[in-house]
Image (tube, grey):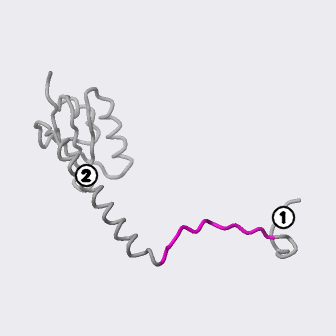
Amino acid sequence: MSENKKVVVKVDVHDNKDKRNALKSVSSLQGINSIAMDMKDKKLTVIGDIDPVCIVSKLKKWHPTILTVGLAKDVKKDDKNDDDKKKKEQEVDFKKWLEYNRYYYPYYMPQQYGVRSVDEYPNNCVIC
């Protein structure tokens, strides 16, 4: 079993339409795990079990240049830690917000709807 590669290709894209078409053409290849495009630097990052030459052949229209080819790192452990940290931060932020606003919002007030009659508002549009 071959390992996942991370291929970074510089692509000459100018707008979101070019970006969408480039991503669509590369996504048709087999063995891709993820694709990302950085419009600022015009770099396309492809992670998966794929040959860089196949990627370049799909991107001929946008004058591709291979910048780096290497092994993709496993970031699953870091992602779990980051997710836990984000959840804890959100809980702390909500608790701070609730503590600060408990005097302004002591209980939930449901939306109240009013019914208007035609006699009270004669200029309203009424379909008969």
Q: Residue 11 at x, y = what percent?
A: 23, 45
Q: Which residue lies furthest to the bottom in this view?
A: 103
Would you place residue 91 above or below residue 81 in this image?
below
Secondary structure beneath dot 2 equals helix
Q: In front: 41, or 3?
A: 3
Q: Residue at x 21, y 54 (%)?
A: 41
Q: In front: 90, or 7?
A: 90
User: The C terminus lies in which quarter of the figure?
Assistant: bottom right
Q: Is residue 73 left or right of residue 36?
A: left
Residue 110 in the magenta stretch? The answer is yes
Tell me the kind of residue under disc 2: Asp
Would you place residue 98 above or below residue 42 in this image?
below
Classify 10 Å Cα crowding around label 2: few (below 14), some (14-19), many (20 and above).
Answer: few
Magenta stretch bounds: 104-116
Tell me the kind of residue under disc 1: Val
Q: Residue 75 at x, y = what percent?
A: 17, 43
Residue 74 in the magenta stretch? The answer is no
Q: Which residue is drawn at 24% across and 51% down?
A: 42
Would you place residue 61 above or below residue 49 in this image?
below
Which of the 4 quarters of the picture holds residue 1? top left
In this rendering, which labeled residue sits more in front, label 2 or label 1?
A: 2
| Image mark for residue 126 | 1
Which of the 4 quarters of the picture holds residue 40? bottom left
Q: In this view, does 119 lie to the left or right of 39?
A: right
Q: Of callouts 2 and 1, which one flags the residue occurring earlier in the amino acid sequence?
A: 2
Q: Principal SS element in the magenta part?
A: loop
Q: In front: 64, or 40?
A: 40
Which of the 4 quarters of the picture holds residue 89? bottom left
